[in-house]
Each structure stands twice: as C-alpha cells, then as structure tokens.
Amino acid sequence: MKRLYLILGLILAVLLALPGVLNNYWMEIFILIFFYAYLGQCWNILTGYTGNISLGHALYVGIGAYTATRLAMVFGLSPWLGMLVGGLFATGVGLVIGFLGFRFGLRGVYFVLITISFAEIGRLIALHLESLGSFMGLFIDFNPGFLNMQFRGNLPYYYISLGLLVFSLIVVRTLELSKTGRYLVAIREDEEAAESLGVNTLKYKMVAIGLSAFMTALGGTFDANRIFHLSPDRVMSMGLSIEIILRPIIGGMGTVLGPVVGSFLITLPAEWTRAFFSEMGRPGLHMVIYGFVLILAVFFFPRGIMPLLTRKLRPFFIKE
Amino acid sequence: MDPFLVLQLALQGFLMGGVYGLIALGLSLIFGVMKVINFAHGEMMVFAMFLSITLLLWGGLDPYLSLVIVAAVMFGVGYAVQRVFVNRILDLPEAMQVLVLVGLGIIFENGTLMIWGGSDLSPKTSLALSSFRWGPVTVDVPRLIAFILAIVITLLVLLFLKKTNIGKSIRAAADNRYGALIIGVHINRLYGICFGIGAACVGAAGALLVPLMPAKATMGAPYTMISFVIVILGGMGSLIGALIGGLIIGVAESLGTVFLPSSMKQVVSFTIMIVILLFKPQGLFGGRG
C-alpha cells in the first residue's frame, strides 16, 4: 500500500507543478478531467458503494450552481459560503429523494426512474422561474477576486478543481475504510443479508445519498463561477447526468480511483473527436462516435478498467 | 373555467394518448421480455418520423401509407440492434445496461441529426389542417386518424402475442427464460423479433405523429421519458396497461395545460409517476402479462 500512496503522491506533485508548462487549452482540458472525475466520484459514493443507480445527479449540480449564484446576486454572499448553503439544500433534496426511494423499497430500474423524474421536474422548474432567469439562465457579472470565486485565466480554476478532486478522493478513501463504508458495500452486495445482521440499511443509504448530493452541489457552484453562465439545459440536463455517470462506470464503480482513471481515459478522446469531427461539417458525427465508444467500452470492460488494472498492478503495490 | 375548453383539451389529450400508448407498448414489450429499459426509445421514434417525412418528400407517400414501410424498416433496425448490441448485455449489471442503451440513444439522436440536420421539418400532409365539429368540441382529423390507427395497431400486436406461435413463445420467454430454453425456443431469435416489434410499434407511432407536429432531431428525450411514465403507470411489462396508461397520461398532460404553462405539462406526468412509484410500484396492471 505504501508504494501506491507514494506513486499517487508523485502524480499529485506532477499535477501541482504541471500548470507551469501547460498552455491555456491544455489547462482547460485538465480542469475538465478533474471536474468530471470529481462529479463522478460524488456519484460513485451513492451508486458505486450502495448499488442504487442515480441518473439524476445533474439536479444536485444545478441546485449548487443556482443557489450559490442567486445568493451572490441578491445578498452579495461569497460563493465560498454560498456553495455550502447550496450543498445543504442539495443534501435536503437528496434526502427527500432517498427517503422516498429507499423507504418504499424502490430498487434497480425503479430507483433510476425516480431520480430521473425528480431531476426533470427540477429542470422544468428552473426553466420557468423568472428569478432563475427561466430558459435564458443566469449570467454572472465578472468581478474577479478570491472572495467572488472568479478569476482571470485558468490557473486558479485548475487548482480549485484539483483541490476538489483530491478532497473527494480523501473522503471516499476514508469512507471506504470506515465502518459506514463497509456497511454500504454490504448493502450493495446483499441488502437482505446486511439487514438480517443488524445493519440499519435505510440510515446508511441516506448517509450515502446525502453526502453524494452535498459534494455534487459543491461542484455545481465551482462550474457556475468558471463559466459565468448557467442555464437549465446546461447544468440540469439529462445530458449532464449521463456525463457524470460515464467516467466512474468506465473506470470502475465502487473503487476509489475508478472515476479518476475513467476521466483521464474518456475526457481527452471526447474532446479530440469533438474538435476533429465538428470541423468536418457534419453536426452530430462526433456524438455518434462517442456513443459507439461508450458501448464498446462496456463490451470490453463490463466491470470497468479498475479491476483489470488492479489485477495487473496489485503484486507491485501490495506485498502479500 | 370554461367547461368546453376543458372538454376540448381532454378530448385532444385522449386522442394523443392513443399514440402515447402505442409508443409505450413497444417499451413495455421490450422490458417485459428482456428486462432491459430501452433508453433509446424516443430517439428511435424521431428517427422513424424522419424516415416517414423522407418518404413523403421523395415519394409523395402519405404518412398513413408509409407507416407500413416505416414500421417494417424499424422492425429490421430493432432486430439488428438487439442482436448486435442488446443481446450481449442481458446478463450485465444494471448500470452497464443503462449505459449501453443510453449510448444507443445518443447514436440514434445524433445519427438523425447527421442525416437530416438540426432544423424543424413539418411537411404538408393531405389532411393536416382539416377538422370537424362534434357537438361543442372540435376534432382534428389527423389526430383522430392517429388515434384510431394507434389503437388498431396496439390490438393487432396484442392479438399477435396471444394467438400466433411466435407470440406464444415470446410470452413463454417473458414468463420463464430458462423454461423456454429447455423446451427448445430459439431464444436469441425470439428476443430479436421482440425488440423488432417494439421498434416497429414506436416507428408506426412516429409516422402517425408526422402530420401532428414538426419533427426535430433532438426532440426524442421527452418521448423516452413519457413512455417510462406510461409504462410505470400501466405496470412494467403489461401491454394493456401501456394502452390505458397512455390514455390517462395523454388526458392528464392536456388538462395540465389549463393551470400550467404548456412546456411544463411534463411536471404533471412526472408527479403521477412518482406517486405511482411510491404507492403502487407494480403499476395499475402490473403482474399480468
């Protein structure tokens, strides 16, 4: 294990020093990699560790983005505080969805559908509330400064997104080693068995969805203050929900490093095909290729890439 | 509130509900037999709409006639999609299945976008604007025809499943896959046919919608959602439930526009879905095949 931490520390050091040699374009790519790895990690807490698939995580991103932005616009509250408020709000919503879903015993496909429908209702509400800018969305005035979480250039965003990612890795690793984490895995593997051994499954699943929603919302605030514009179709769409689940599934659900590996593998090719094929003048072509990549990835790595990596690399990192 | 307006909206929703029912029938059939949720359902419908429009623009074929061709083509597409993609994922964990079907949805949506472009298409059809008064309400003729044809197709599919040999083996495979295998049902071919029928249903529905609304390559997702709602309401895998659920959702959405802006009408159906999921997750007709 020591070796693994050493290597990860080395990688982190390289990533910390990397902006020195990156141009703006590459900085942007790395921010996207970190950001989606972070969101994937948040989703992983719920789905990877408890086995309940959420396809509505864009809802929490949207709540985080809109709450913090609205608070900043109306009360001048710093997004650093606003993101906590948004996080708590998202936790509340997540707990309601979780309670309804878990209490009434919705599993598998049924849970997927309830998360989708809540996310769609959220999107439709944002689309029609005047105070949230309805379909035009909200435009954030550019006032650079640390307190406003707005900066010139990509460098600060690079470090914030990297910070978020490292934070999520630490949280999930801690969770994995804790008693709660073991309970969650037990619930995923066999809920009845866990329950019969005295695990309060409802409570621990609520913990998972609450934590997942809270952290996802933090990401939403970050995104809003990087793009300076949020609209329901960008931050609350089904498309975003799909983007979020993609990387941890490709990387390997229920593993700490899966979402990160998945993000490094997927983000770059996705960006390249977009840049390459959208120049060829056929709209949609790059998304068709993206769809095929997704399907092929599932065919070749039905459990994600992490199990494969673990099998190959484990002897090197962990001495039995 | 004007009672005639409500009546008018209810009638329009009811007629539309027949087409919804046909769309949901395909989804329910696929789920009932293969236990996968076709996340590409609405996108397949839009693809079929554009097929039908192309036949209209090139061949002058009215959507009500080209319906047969479109349904046949979609059957082939569905069969191929099942054999090439869906058949491999039947035993995978649910998250993986979702991912593959979402991937198929992306391919259908953007394939449509690639072939036909991103603009609205609303070609003129022969009966597009005709209507007649029936007592206090006005009835659109294309809507009425769409409704009647949708019901007829739905009944034909039900009859096919009840009476023919293939239909019987499809139901047998839905009941017990292993058992069907043992008595010599060619299960892979059967699954292909079943997915094909689902796709043909949604293809026919797409053709029926051509005279009713402009087609846009990216409009599929809401139809996927709405067919989920209907299937949940009617009961997963229940075919008659899909029809009745479609009628209920059609009326509910249409009446929802009385007190909500029309682009928010989906809130009504999602609310219905959540309530059903919580209190009667097996749906109104769940448990029966």
Image (cartoon, coloured by chain):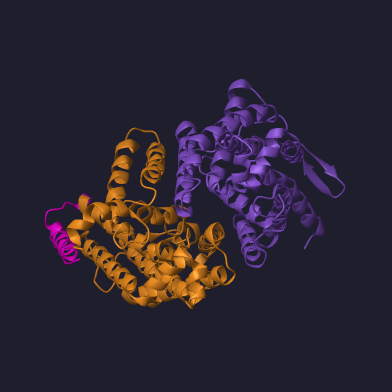
Of A223 and A241, nearer the camera is A241
Q: Is residue B27 magenta?
A: no
Give residue B9's position: percent from left, percent from top. 74, 53
Of B129 and B142, nearer the camera is B142
Decide: is B189 above or below A23: above
Decide: is A130 above or below B210: below
Please indicate, yes or no, whether residue A30 appears anywhere in the rendered image.
Answer: yes
- Dividing the picture into quarters, in which one does residue B114 lie? top left
**In the image, is A212 to the left or to the right of A3?**
right
Quadrant of the drawing holding the N terminus of chain B = bottom right
- Dividing the picture into quarters, in which one does residue B275 lie? bottom right
Give residue B118's position: percent from left, percent from top. 48, 38
Tell me which segment is drawn in magenta: A1-25
Residue at the far top in the pictured view: B59
Give residue B187's position: percent from left, percent from top. 58, 37
Residue at 62% x, 29% y is B72
Give residue A14's position: percent from left, percent from top. 14, 59
Residue at the far right in the pictured view: B135
Of B228 and A175, nearer the camera is A175
Colour of chain A as rendered: orange
Colour of chain B as rendered: purple
**In the image, is B13 to the left or to the right of B260?**
right
Please indicate, yes or no, whether residue B118 appears anywhere in the rendered image.
Answer: no
Decide: is B94 above or below B187: below
How many marks the image carries: the answer is: 0
For the stretch drawn in magenta, the main secondary structure is: helix
Q: Is residue A7 magenta?
A: yes
Residue at 40% x, 62% y is A48
